[in-house]
Image (tube, rainbow, N blue to C red):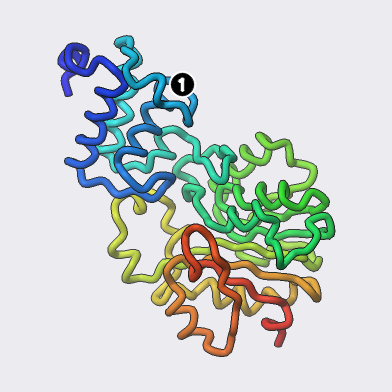
């Protein structure tokens, strides 16, 4: 839209939101990186551009905007529609269970439902959060789950591992933002290869698990994320097989493995028919995250 026309016709926050929803609809955008519809996406980007509280829209709906404010909103709306970038990459922030994390295109956008389980202290599987002494976050990306684990288990030391140097740079910024440098160590390595020889009470992992056919059909927004953080091979189980094989050597006797699989439960059950995990309920459903005890994985 021509900026002069915008100045004459898009006067209020309400006007800009209506325009953004229409623009997103015409562009055929896909969602899933913090919102699941055009309205919520428009609200988030508009409030962010105007430096308004993310949870306070109603009082400002009919407020008129200055020219530079209008330009900021329209620039974000146009980039979202034209470049198909997830909103989190446009604002360099993602919110997970009320916690803000820095993010850019070096790391996958934080959205794992494991965050919900950590917020609950993994109850009832972990009876006393203060008894958790060591936690591992495998494939940490932005470090969001490692940070949430450190907050959930205040006595624990947390190791966070990723193969991507760029993702670890993003994670380091988040760890510093939360002041957790003394308890949370970032390690670059291929799964367990860079880890100290110590048992973990809890391993959480949101690995690359998208199967090849699903990868080929991903919307453009998901293709803007690092492929190595998503692609799990033919059936999505390539890294998961290695994790299940090696995890017993790094789990304490009563240790737990919490693993996110997205929509790959059928592939998991076909690949590992003898395993009988507990499927954990979250707001996203009851077949995306599994829990296994060390005794189920031991040779």
Residue displayed at 75% across by 64% down: 126
The one of 21 and 247 positioned closer to us in this rendering:
21
Residue 131: where, in percent of width, then height? Answer: 84, 59
At 79% from the left and 48% from the top, the residue drawn is 154
Image quadrant holding the C terminus, namely bottom right
Location of residue 217 with respect to 109 vertically, above or below: below
The quarter holding residue 190 reads bottom right
Q: Is residue 204 above or below residue 186?
A: below
Q: Is residue 96 left or right of residue 297?
A: left
Q: Position of residue 244 (x, y in %)?
A: 61, 77
Q: Is residue 144 left or right of residue 247?
A: left
For the view shown, which residue lies furthest in the front direction? 58
Q: Position of residue 224 (x, y in %)?
A: 36, 48
Dot 1 corresponds to which residue? 51
Image quadrant occupied by the N terminus? top left
Q: SS class of the residue under badge 1? A: loop
The foreground one among 223 and 97 is 97
Question: Residue at 56% of width from left, 73% of height from top?
Answer: 279
Is 259 above or below relative to 229? below
The correct choice, above or below, for 173 with respect to 107 in the image is above
Number of numbered callouts drawn: 1
Left or right of residue 203, residue 101 in this image: left
- The residue under the point 32% across, 71% down is 213
Q: Residues within 10 Å of mark 1 (few under 14, many from 20)?
A: few
Residue 266, horizontal then vertical, whole percent: 43, 79
């Amino acid at each position: 839209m021509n900026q002069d026309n915008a100045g004459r016709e898009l006067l209020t926050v309400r006007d800009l939101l209506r325009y953004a929803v229409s623009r997103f609809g015409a562009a055929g955008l896909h969602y899933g990186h913090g919102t699941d519809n055009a309205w919520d996406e428009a609200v988030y980007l508009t409030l962010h551009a105007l430096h308004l509280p993310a949870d306070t829209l109603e009082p400002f709906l009919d407020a008129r905007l200055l020219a530079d404010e209008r330009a900021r909103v329209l620039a974000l709306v146009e980039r979202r529609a034209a470049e198909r970038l997830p909103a989190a990459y446009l604002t360099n922030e993602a919110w997970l269970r009320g916690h803000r994390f820095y993010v850019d295109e070096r790391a996958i956008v934080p959205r794992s439902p494991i965050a919900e389980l950590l917020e609950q202290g993994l109850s009832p599987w972990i009876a006393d959060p203060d008894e958790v002494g060591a936690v591992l976050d495998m494939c940490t990306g932005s470090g969001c789950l490692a940070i949430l684990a450190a907050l959930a288990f205040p006595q624990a030391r947390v190791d966070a591992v990723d193969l991507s140097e760029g993702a670890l740079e993003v994670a380091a910024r988040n760890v510093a933002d939360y002041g957790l440098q003394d308890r949370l160590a970032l390690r670059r390595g291929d799964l367990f290869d860079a880890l100290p020889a110590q048992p973990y009470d809890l391993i959480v992992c949101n690995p690359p698990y998208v199967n090849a056919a699903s990868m080929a059909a991903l919307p453009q927004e998901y293709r803007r994320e690092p492929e190595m953080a998503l692609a799990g091979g033919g059936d999505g189980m390539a890294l998961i097989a290695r994790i299940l094989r090696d995890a017993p050597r790094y789990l304490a006797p009563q240790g737990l493995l919490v693993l996110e699989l997205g929509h790959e439960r059928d592939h998991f059950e076909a690949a590992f028919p003898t395993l009988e995990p507990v499927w954990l309920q979250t707001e996203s459903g009851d077949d995306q995250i599994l829990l296994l005890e060390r005794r189920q994985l031991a040779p």
